[in-house]
Image (tube, grey):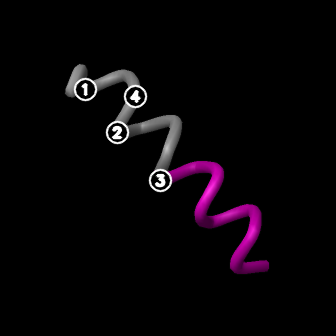
Amino acid sequence: MHPIFTILNTLMFQFWNV
């Protein structure tokens, strides 16, 4: 997996974990 995808996934997870 590309690093960009990982960053995006982390950001999305953070938003969903809000």
Numbered tag placed on residue 6 in the rendering: 2
In the image, residue 15 sits, relative to residue 18, either above or below, namely above
Stretch of the chain drawn in magenta: 10-18
Dot 3 and dot 4 residues touching (CB under 8 Å): no
| Residue lying furthest bottom | 18
**3D distance between C-alphas at marks 4 and 1:** 5 Å
- Residue neighbourhood size for the residue with mark 3, other residues' Cα within 10 Å, grouped as few (<14), some (14–19), many (≥20): few
- Residue neighbourhood size for the residue with mark 1, other residues' Cα within 10 Å, grouped as few (<14), some (14–19), many (≥20): few
| Residue lying furthest front | 1
17 in the magenta segment: yes
Left or right of residue 18, residue 11 in this image: left
**Which residue has dot 4 on it?**
5
In the image, residue 16 sits, relative to residue 7, either above or below, namely below
The amino acid at mark 3 is Thr
Left or right of residue 14, residue 18 in this image: right
The amino acid at mark 1 is Pro
Dot 3 and dot 1 residues touching (CB under 8 Å): no
Is the C terminus in the top left, top right, bottom left or bottom right quadrant?
bottom right
Percent of width and height locating residue 15: 74, 62
Residue appearing at x 52%, y 36% in the figure: 8
Dot 1 and dot 2 residues touching (CB under 8 Å): yes
**Which residue has dot 3 on it?**
10
**3D distance between C-alphas at marks 3 and 1:** 11 Å
**Which residue has dot 1 on it?**
3
Dot 4 and dot 1 residues touching (CB under 8 Å): yes
Label 2 sits on a secondary structure element that is: helix
Percent of width and height locating residue 4: 37, 22
**3D distance between C-alphas at marks 3 and 4:** 9 Å
Dot 4 and dot 2 residues touching (CB under 8 Å): yes
Label 3 sits on a secondary structure element that is: helix
